[in-house]
Image (spheres, rainbow, N blue to C red):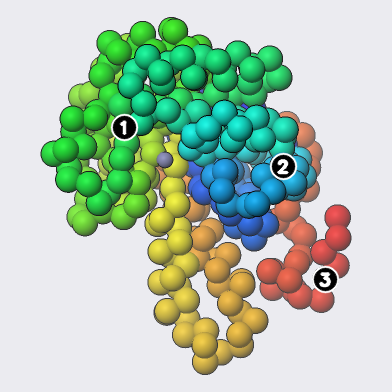
Amino acid sequence: MLVTMKALLEHADKNNYAVMAPNVYYEMDARAAIMAAEEMKAPVILDVCFDTSPDVIEQGWYFRRLAEQASVPVAINQDHGTDFTHAIAAIRGGYTSIMVDRSFLPYEENAAQVKELVKIAHAVGVTVEAELGHVGSAKDDPDERKKTFTKPEEAKRFVEETGCDCLAVAIGTAHGLYKGTPDLDFDLLKELKEALKIPLVLHGGSGSGDDNIRKACRMGINKVNVCSELLQNIQLLLEETDWRNEDIEQLWPNIMKGFTMRLKELMVISGSAGKSWTEENKTGLSHKKTVFGEEKDAPHFI
Ligand SMILES: [Zn+2]
């Protein structure tokens, strides 16, 4: 069932858990994400970067088609849109949410651009995620990153001024894979949740540590973005299964398996497993056999 991200996050906020938002690039990983969600009876967000396809609009409508068939609630979010045209293309592509990331700009410009796109997106029922403070890269110096943590008073003003539906906050995570496990500022998270009272988003979920993610999701994080860790898990599984010396056609099923294995674990850690709230009686994607599944000769049309 295709839903807005706002609907997903409001349910998560009310019930104190987080929805997993894996980055997806193609049909295969989008299907894997939805199939993992169906198996875990969890809502899920397909997080799609604007540059994963040369045709954002066609790709968006394809993801919508998958989401509409799902037996669990699915939102489609543009991850890190950094330009006005990215947002408009995503809306035309049928995304149910856009991230308007202007965290690299000074406060006033960030707020002004988010506010403008909130007005446009809300007019057509699309959810808006913004970012204040700056999450940054795992390659950056942790002490330097601390300087860009989200400030509660400023964030409160930002949410009131822009009308954004959810906010990505900088509390110690970063994009990419860390050396070791990062320290998260849970006191800051508590302050932010009390000040903002809206769903909060954790970027850089990969490698943040299961205990950190579990705790953050019980303290007000309602969406966890993950990418590198899923790709790394695919790599590890391929190395383990030695697919080069086995049937080369096992490459695609193993890629999907590596992706779903870790995503399903994260759905348990984030508390979203078992939280599907769709009442529609859809059969979902999981029952459909495709060349990516085990029964290759079964029909894969819908
Ligand atoms: Zn991010």
Mark 3 to mark 2 CA distance (whole Å): 30 Å
- Which residue is pictured at 55% across the width and 68% down the height? 255
**Mark 2 residue element:** helix
In the displayed structure, 163 sits above or below 121; it is above
Residue 43 percent coordinates (x, y): 59, 38
Residue nearest the observer in this picture, 169 or 109:
109
**Mark 1 residue element:** loop
Residue nearest the observer in this picture, 26 or 193:
26
- Which residue is pictured at 61% across the width and 87% down the height? 247
**Mark 3 residue element:** loop
In the displayed structure, 15 sits above or below 205; it is above
Q: Which residue is mark 2?
A: 57
Q: Which residue is mark 3?
A: 298
Mark 2 to mark 1 CA distance (whole Å): 28 Å
Label 2: few (<14), some (14–19) or many (≥20) C-alpha neighbours in 10 Å: some
**For residue 198, which quarter of the picture?**
top left
Query: Mark 1 near ligand 1 (CB under 8 Å)?
Result: no
Label 3: few (<14), some (14–19) or many (≥20) C-alpha neighbours in 10 Å: few
Q: Earlier in the sequence, mark 3 or mark 2?
A: 2
Position of the N terminus by quadrant: top right
Q: Is residue 96 left or right of residue 207?
A: right
* Residue 281 shows up from this direction: yes
Residue type, label 3: Ala
Residue 89 percent coordinates (x, y): 67, 35
Q: Earlier in the sequence, mark 2 or mark 1?
A: 2
Residue type, label 2: Ile
Q: Earlier in the sequence, mark 3 or mark 1?
A: 1
Q: Most extreme residue toward the bottom, as rendered? A: 245
**For residue 218, which quarter of the picture?**
top left
Residue 125 percent coordinates (x, y): 68, 20
Q: Quadrant of ligand 1?
A: top left
In the displayed structure, 33 sits above or below 118; it is below
